[in-house]
Amino acid sequence: MHEFQDTDGVLFDLDGTLASDGKPLPWAHGLIEKSRGRFAIVTNDAEHTASQIAVLMQAIGIPVPECRIVSAGMEAIRQVAIDMPGARLSMAASKSLQDYATCLGLDVTDIKPDAVLIGRDRAFSYDKIRTLSNAVLAGAQLFVCNPDRTHPGADGSVVPETGALAASVLACTGPVPHHIIGKPQPGLFLAGMALIGSTPARTLMVGDNPETDGKGAAGVGIRFVRVGFEHGDEDWLLQAHPERVGKRDRLSRFD
């Protein structure tokens, strides 16, 4: 595959690129092999830690060390810890990400928080909207793990994502400054390149979504290659031209 030539490192999206509906996609192992071991996974996952994602991938036959996984949830928490060391942080997030924030020295609390962080929180509620909205209106900085509002479930239903939860808070606060960490913002791409020691000109981004993977890669000067099904065939490497893509496999995160 000539797309991998003249490349020092490869960034892979996860959902829809390596896995779908809790199963490896037919081209996943071939893509990883073509990277010659110089790769990182950059995912907008805002619920799981890298270690959890590694376990999930191992279970579907794609062994990837957690040190090669860059996730929006963990990167957002790291950004808070860098910008605001020891801050009081109110979170809409999974227990594992709350524990990670504590490990980085942040004080996870809803009492007069300095910052608010929104991830993919399956226990999100009316009370949580009220708590986070009032914290932001009182001056807490707002961090959103990724802008995705939904992703398609295995049966074609809509699965709410981080962006939908953030939208409910912003509906209450009105337009306020906030930080978005996940793709297409540059943070995950930069972290992935730092992990594998590559530069934009020598890095390839492989993903399925031109709106997140493609635009984000272009924003930092990285070449983008799109994967997907074309007309029902398993043509597993497609250049990033949306008009070439016909019937596509339905995508799903680890649910």
Image: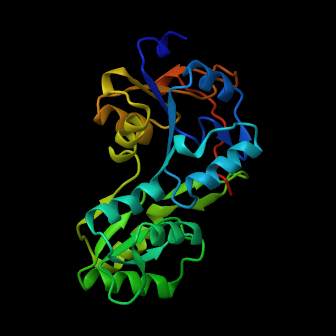
- Which residue is at 51% across, 72% downward? 98
Residue 121 lies in quadrant: bottom right
- Which residue is at 70% across, 21% downward? 233
Figure check: 138 above or below 252 = below
Residue 241 appears in the picture as rendered:
no
Q: Is residue 167 left or right of residue 209?
A: left
The percent coordinates of residue 241 (x first, y second) are: 45, 23
- For the residue pair 45 and 159, the one nearer the viewer reads as 45
Q: Is residue 24 left or right of residue 167?
A: right
Residue 194 appears in the picture as rendered:
yes
- For the residue pair 151 and 3, the one nearer the viewer reads as 3
The percent coordinates of residue 172 (x first, y second) are: 34, 80
Figure check: 214 above or below 253 = above
How is the model colour-coded?
rainbow
Q: Is residue 215 left or right of residue 158?
A: left
Query: From the image, which quarter does the N terminus lie in?
Result: top right
The percent coordinates of residue 161 (x first, y second) are: 52, 61
- For the residue pair 58 and 91, the one nearer the viewer reads as 58
Q: Is residue 153 left or right of residue 142?
A: right
Residue 255 lies in quadrant: bottom right
- Which residue is at 32% across, 31% downward? 218
In this figure, what is the number of numbered marks? Answer: 0
Figure check: 185 above or below 179 = above
- Which residue is at 58% across, 59% downward? 48
The percent coordinates of residue 186 (x first, y second) are: 32, 43
